[in-house]
Amino acid sequence: MIERILVRYGDLTLKGKNKKTFINTCIKRIKERVQNDVVEYKKSHNRLYIILNGQAADPIIKQLKTVSGLAGFTKVSRSDKSIEAIAKTALKRLKHIKKPTTMKVETKRSDKGFPLTSQEISQQVASIVLSSHPYLDADVHHPDLTLNVEVREENAYVFTDFIEGMRGFPVGTMGKGIVLLSGGIDSPVAAYLSMVKGIEVELLHFESTPLTSIESSQKVIDIAKKLSRYGINRSVKLHLVPFLDIHQSLLEKVPDAYQITIMRRMMMRIAENFANKDFTPVLINGESIGQVASQTLDGMKITEMVTRIPVLRPLATMEKNAVINIARNIETYKISIRPFEDCCAVYTPKQPVTHPREMYALRYEKLFDYKPQIKTALKNIKTLTITPESDIVLNDAGFTVEDALTEED
Ligand code: ATP
Ligand code: MG
């Protein structure tokens, strides 16, 4: 009964060539996800129609919800061009309403040959719908819902709902960023928010198996699966950095209070190096001001001082609750709270320094020869291309990610 889906784009304040790229990329992302040869796409000004040709609307809308750059969607029913037919179609669309609800009708008439004005159409349709529906009442000022009628040359169209999209920019239009992804709650949300803004992300995870459990790496793979739904071609690259040697060295050599600071600086050095290899312009992490001892402004400064690449922190000023809400919506929350710790939670000192100083960081970094270790880590990065359907299970294969992946092959 739904004949087409009306897709509205997000930020149409863009002008000229940017707008064209925006719209064309949106359509590309939509087609990648919908993957249905029966439906047809019809561009119209600042909208897109997906003509369903008998295909179900809901599975397609589920996919559209993963396309950044879209403001929202409306399920549109076709009707013959008579008041009775329009009212009948409207009643079908409204029959799920089972509690008192107010509504108004709004009509657009592009068929200027139609014998009634827009206002007359609205009034006459409303009169039939309101008198036939047990729960609907009129309210033209603050209605609970608006029934939209469009009378065009070929047909009339009826729709009511507006389903919110991701908004933002289509992924890929803003270049690329490397997200430092842990198994925690925050960095997956940072990755998602970056994708909403049109950034193509690649995920970089530092794993210290067997010092950390294999399950903590599995979490990251499972989180990547969820994030891949929003990526170009429904996929995302996950790079696993073997961090064990560096991790062990710094646990041995660096005084407790500075271990987290130094660990972060090592991660940054590797991440920057990795990003530079293919000219990726930014790093992205899940830090939020004051959330843990190491995420003070001084902490962030000392961490970032080892790099020259900009570091985006989409969560910097967000409240934890807001972050958790997003994590729930994108289905990463449940994975993140599985009780396996990643490298930063395991062996954490009781009192990490909250206002680290560069002088000490540099001094402690001289206590071990990290440069060759960084080189080796970079050389041994394992890259997985993850999709929502990926079926990578590490658990029984070995104690380390490397074993597990070798057994996989
Ligand atoms: P998260 O929930 O993202 O783990 P957090 O509040 O637990 O964040 P930390 O564990 O201190 O904070 O980590 C801060 C940021 O450093 C993370 O958001 C992430 O971007 C990065 N990070 C931490 N551990 C790793 C790791 N093992 N691999 C890659 N990035 C990491
Ligand atoms: Mg963490």
Image (cartoon, rainbow, N blue to C red):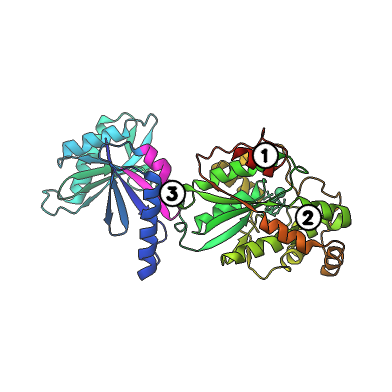
Circle 2: residue type: Ile
Residue at the (63%, 60%) spot, across then down:
313
Residues drawn in magenta: 58-75
Residue at the (32%, 30%) spot, across then down:
95
Residue 285: % across, % down: 65, 57
- Helix, strand or loop at mark 1: loop
Circle 1: residue type: Ile
146 left or right, relative to 87: right
Picture layout, residue 309 above or below residue 167: below
Q: Is residue 327 magenta?
A: no
Residue 123: % across, % down: 22, 44
Q: Is residue 187 visible?
A: yes
The tag on residue 337 is 1
**Which residue in the protein does label 3 denote?**
165
Residue at the (83%, 54%) spot, across then down:
249
362 left or right, relative to 332: right
Give how far apart the Cα atoms at labels 2 and 3 are: 43 Å
The tag on residue 345 is none
Give how far apart the Cα atoms at labels 1 and 3 are: 27 Å
The mark that comes first in sequence, 2 or 1, is: 2
Picture layout, residue 282 above or below residue 114: below
- Helix, strand or loop at mark 3: loop
- 2 or 1: mark nearer the eye: 2
61 left or right, relative to 184: left
